[in-house]
Amino acid sequence: MAWIKAVAAAGTGLLASCGSSIAPLRPAWQQDPNLFHQGFPAYQAQTATTPHMVARVVYAEPEHVRHMVERQDDVPETQRGLARMGDGTVDLGVQDAASGKWLVSHLCGGILFVEGLPSQAYRIVLKNRTPMPLELGAGVDGKDVKTGKAATLGRGGLRVEPRGTIVLDHAAHGPLLFKKVEGDAALFDTSAQGMPGVIQLAVFLASDAPSIGPEKLRASQIAPFGLFPVGRPEQYR
């Protein structure tokens, strides 16, 4: 019995000494290079520098917005409330801060065009449509919403719980206010910083998100040229 107690004590001490060196448990998408989503390794799209998607908003005065939408040479869809962005990970909309009414917006060419007047206070509403927690980096007019520094497309520390909603109505230096937008440069600006008239929300799967599922794709199931594979795991249900 004394021998058993000694062995147990030694094992406990060993675990305690090694505890600090054991890597924390990570979700499967961070560990497994063979886990695919839409034909691509899932872990590649979930790094600190590569967002899962970027929801992009371009705003200007009503006539200016209509002009830029025409330049898109695509079919616009006028939105009444939240708009489905990208692959459907998030819904996004912009409201007047004073009245709470949804601002007139048009989804065209993957961009949400919002009609707003200079110095008008507004708020951004984003809904997480997935059962996974998300992290956001929010850049408005070239500035990070939280820090006021130059915007990036990295993780910004804003968290949205599964199926949850986040409302942004203030930046680091005060309320969100539309600026005067001149010309059509905002339409073509794809930089990480953005410029006046451009709002970019970089969307990441949260670092503590659970595994997206046990299903893996064999090499034979992955279609060539990035086409949709047969039997891909459904991440967002």
Image: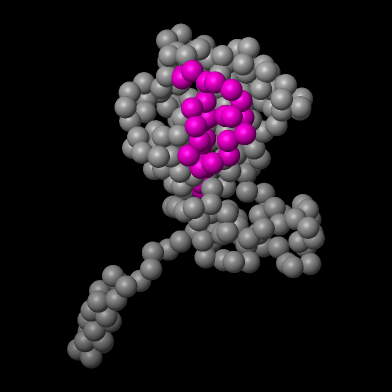
Q: Which residues are magenta?
A: 178-205
**Left or right: 132, with 12 as reference point:** right
Q: Residue at x 80, y 60 (%)?
A: 224
User: Is residue 101 in view?
Assistant: yes
Q: In the picture, which quadrant includes the C terminus?
A: top right
- To which quarter of the image does residue 93 belong? top right
What x and y, as percent, mark residue 94?
52, 21
- Which residue is found at the position 67% from the left and 58% from the top? 40
Left or right of 219 in this view: 154: left
Where 202 falls versus 216 (above or below)? above
Residue 68 is left or right of residue 24, and the answer is right
**The N terminus: image quadrant:** bottom left
Above or below: residue 163 compared with residue 205: above
Q: How many marks?
A: 0
Q: Residue 92, can we see it?
A: no
Residue that appears at 59% across and 22% down: 183
In the image, farthest residue toward the bottom: 3
Question: Which x, y percent locates residue 105?
Answer: 61, 19
Q: Is residue 24 above or below residue 64?
A: below
> In terms of depth relative to the viewer, which is nearer, 129 or 7?
129
53 vs 164: above or below? below
157 or 235: nearer the eye?
A: 157
Residue 32 at x, y = what percent? 57, 66
For residue 214, side relative to residue 15 (left or right): right
Name the quadrant containing residue 6. bottom left
Residue 195 within the segment the image draws in magenta: yes
Q: List the single residue furthest toward the front.
A: 183
Residue depicted at x 53% and y 15%: 116
| Residue 155 location (% of width, % of height) | 44, 46
Classify residue 185 by image quadrant: top right
